[in-house]
Amino acid sequence: MLNDPLFLLAAGACLVVAIILAMGISTFGKPGIDNAKRSNKFMRWRIIAQFIAVMAILAFVTIRNQFGGQ
């Protein structure tokens, strides 16, 4: 499974989502309008990255089931 490029793409996308989430959460506790705007921007990026990650996971599962890769 570690040799499958689609699996690596899905895992990398999940890692990107986790990093963006951590960056967004880290700005929640800081005071100021600029930090609030930055936090909202990170959360919007997280939604987009999460969508890409879910699509990559679904593609991996679908292709793996169709072609019987084990």
Image (cartoon, grey):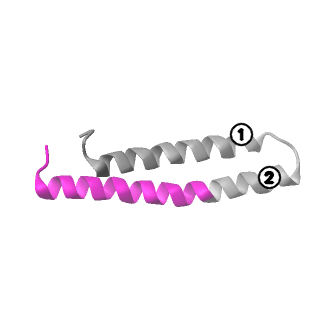
Q: Amino acid at mark 2?
A: Ala
Label 2: which secondary element: helix
- Kindly identify which numbered label has been placed on residue 48: none
**Residue marked by disc 1:** 26
Residue in front for this viewpoint, 8 or 43? 8
For residue 28, side relative to residue 59 (left or right): right
Upstream in sequence: badge 1 or badge 2 = 1
Could you tell me which residue is drawn at 60 percent across and 47 percent down? 20
The 10 Å Cα crowd at callout 1, few under 14, some 14 to 19, many 20 or more, is few
**Residue marked by disc 2:** 36
The 10 Å Cα crowd at callout 2, few under 14, some 14 to 19, many 20 or more, is some
Residue in front for this viewpoint, 5 or 14? 5
Q: Position of residue 38 (x, y in %)?
A: 75, 53
Q: Which residues make up the magenta segment?
A: 45-70
Q: Position of residue 43 (x, y in %)?
A: 64, 54
Q: Amino acid at mark 1?
A: Ser
For residue 37, side relative to residue 70 (left or right): right
Q: Is mark 1 in CB contact (under 8 Å) with mark 2?
A: no
Q: CA distance from mark 1 to mark 2?
A: 11 Å
Location of residue 45 with respect to 23 vertically, above or below: below
Could you tell me which residue is drawn at 54 percent across and 61 percent down? 48
Label 1: which secondary element: helix
Query: Hey, which residue is sitting farthest right in the picture?
Result: 32
Instruction: Specify the principal SS of the magenta part.
Output: helix
Residue 52 lies in the magenta stretch? yes
Q: Splitting the image into 4 quarters, where does residue 25 fall?
A: top right
Could you tell me which residue is drawn at 36 percent across and 56 percent down? 56
For residue 45, side relative to residue 49 (left or right): right
Q: Quadrant of the image for the N terminus? A: top left
Residue 63 lies in the magenta stretch? yes
Could you tell me which residue is drawn at 37 percent across and 50 percent down? 9
